[in-house]
Image: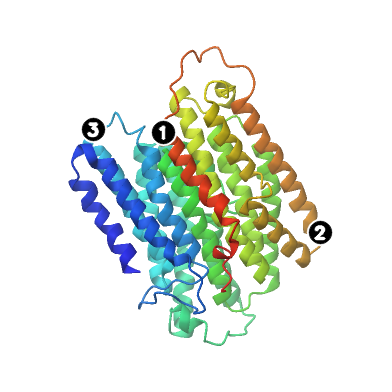
Amino acid sequence: MLKIILPTIMLLPTALLSPPKFLWANTTSHSLLIASISLQWLVPTYYPYKNLTQWTGIDQTSSPLLALSCWLLPLMMIASQNHLQPEPLARKRIFILTLITIQPFIILAFSTTELMLFYISFEATLIPTLILITRWGNQPERLSAGIYLLFYTLISSLPLLIAILHLHTQTGTLHFTILHLTHPILTTSWSSLLSSLALLTAFMVKAPLYGLHLWLPKAHVEAPIAGSMLLAALLLKLGGYGIMRFTMLMTPTPNDLHYPFLTLALWGALMTSSICLRQTDLKSLIAYSSVSHMGLVIAATMIQTHWSFSGAMILMISHGLTSSMLFCLANTNYERTHSRILLLTRGLQPLLPLMATWWLLANLTNMALPPTTNLMAELTIMIALFNWSTFTIILTGMATLLTASYTLFMLLMTQRGMLPAHITSIQNSNTREHLLMILHITPLLLLILKPELISGIPS
């Protein structure tokens, strides 16, 4: 565990002391080394916990997410180089420091075996994200986006803290391993209902559930590219991971507590997909699409079967890579045309043909086309939901149809059609951007060869 966390912390002096010429090269290569070491966590094991220290341990639920979070740090650095070009050196260093600071907290949140430490690191990820959005965002509206993010997260996570303290007074411990051994207290009292509701709400806001999702499009649209990748690929997954962890620990929740969440999640997948069809803003469209994908994850984690958990796990990983790639592509368009409006960035395929290939690949992955893990995950989730209740097939089927239609709409709007008159000369796509896309799409295409690495099932 420490052999990942310590090099990650040592990235801080690397970023501070590197000579200006080698600043990006040093930090990116160092974080790529850490990412490659972290792949060993994916090795399946018979033990419930690997690398168990006193506070941290890795099991099948957390190892895919940990590998994903280590994998995305170098990608965020590669993506951010262009828009930090005009900034002075000190600000570049501060930006890289902010990105690196968030990493140990995310690793701790995914690998901790103690609830209080989980809560602390869960909340600590908020501060660097807030700095990223409110300092390096593009528009002045970034301040209101930051306030939305801060208050949604804080108001929802205060009940979580109270519920964790309540659990501690009930059982006397907060360790996962010991909590698994304690007998569930079979009560139908108000306190157990309210505590399970409090535990769920914090993660529902983070995940985000439809109805509590209003901070997400705002934050995504205003964030710089690294902030968008971080939010879409990692911070939303904290919500899904929290639900998967806590629903196993909670006293058997009354069934009627699950119904509103399930209904909202599936209905929200439908609603946000149809909102996507009416979007004019590219980043906003991608943000709403992640709400609809996470809606499926929430619905799957609510019914708590083996199939649905493994489907939710695979969908979280594949959505993390896909939406991160889509945000990178949107950012390449934005850096060239300085506009996120779909009408003003039409017809870029003849100008940037290789970028159009990446657009096609990313959109087909987002649509869940056969040789991708997205399809496997969505099918697993739909079968699990159909097995739980036959009527869910109507909602999930319509959501799939709408997902395909808005994804094709996004592809046609950005790549096809007449070139707008104001685009006269456009900068070529460069090797850095192609490398970034390759590093996103390769894991997605390789994981289908061995999906049990990320399925979350102990092998």
Q: Are marks 2 and 1 in contact (CB under 8 Å)?
A: no
The C terminus - image quarter: bottom right
Label 2 amino acid?
Phe
Is disc 2 surrounded by few (<14), some (14 to 19) or many (20+) residues within 10 Å? few
Q: CA distance from mark 2 to mark 1?
A: 48 Å
Q: CA distance from mark 2 to mark 3?
A: 57 Å
Is disc 3 surrounded by few (<14), some (14 to 19) or many (20+) residues within 10 Å? few
Query: Can you give x and y, in whole percent of width and height, for residue 386 in the image?
Result: 77, 62
Which residue bears the numbered disc 3?
A: 88
Residue 391's label in the rendered image is 2
Answer yes or no: is residue 309 visible: yes
Quadrant location of residue 435? top left
Lower position in the chain sequence, tag 1 or tag 3: 3
Residue drawn 50% across the image and 75% down it: 45
Does residue 451 appear to the left or right of 436 in the view shown?
A: right
Which residue bears the numbered disc 1?
A: 431
Q: Are marks 2 and 3 in contact (CB under 8 Å)?
A: no
Q: Nearer the viewer, mark 2 or mark 3?
A: 3
Query: Can you give x and y, in whole percent of width and height, for residue 326 in the image?
Result: 53, 40
Label 1 amino acid?
Thr
Answer yes or no: is residue 261 visible: no
Label 3 amino acid?
Pro
